[in-house]
Amino acid sequence: MRRAQSFPVLETERLNLRAVMPEDHDFYHSLLAVRDVTRFSDFPDAPARAQSGRILAWMSKRFGSGKGCAWLIEQRRGGRAGRRNPHQPHR
């Protein structure tokens, strides 16, 4: 029998890598609207809000089901994913 494990959190001086959570939906939905983000993925370009919610829910269940994990990268200082506008070019 497998023992439940807590989701691993990786931290660097600037970043946290953590589990995807339902509270990330607004950011994740806006991120999927950026063509360069979805270009090489299996995710649809600019999905409807309900569809991005289903994708996020699927990602957040991966670890608990033992079928993988989905990480979200956030800046440690702000404590939120997507502090930068995904529609602006990276500098």
Image (cartoon, rainbow, N blue to C red):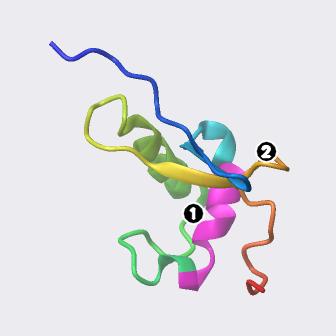
Asked if the magenta segment contains residue 66, the reply would be no
Question: Magenta-highlighted stretch: main secondary structure?
Answer: helix
The one of 37 and 29 positioned closer to us in this rendering: 37
The one of 63 and 75 positioned closer to us in this rendering: 75
The residue at the point 54 percent across, 56 percent down is 52
Q: Residues within 10 Å of mark 2 (few under 14, many from 20)?
A: few
Image-quadrant location for residue 44: bottom left
Extent of the magenta region: 25-36
Asked whether, in this view, residue 77 is left or right of residue 26, the answer is right
Seen in the picture, residue 43 relative to 82 is either above or below; the reply is: below
Estimate the x, y position of residue 49 in percent, counting from the top left.
61, 57
Q: Quadrant of the N terminus?
A: top left
Q: Which badge, 1 or 2, comes first in the chain's sequence?
A: 1
Q: Residues within 10 Å of mark 1 (few under 14, many from 20)?
A: few
What amino acid is at disc 2? Gly
What amino acid is at disc 1? Ala
Estimate the x, y position of residue 22 in percent, counting from the top left.
61, 38
Mark 1 to mark 2 CA distance (whole Å): 26 Å
Asked whether, in this view, residue 30 is left or right of residue 41, the answer is right
Asked if the magenta segment contains residue 27, the reply would be yes
Asked whether, in this view, residue 74 is left or right of residue 48, the answer is right
Residue occupying the far left of the picture: 1
Residue located beneath label 1 in the image: 48
Q: In what element is the residue under mark 1?
A: loop
Residue located beneath label 2 in the image: 79
The residue at the point 43 percent across, 46 percent down is 59
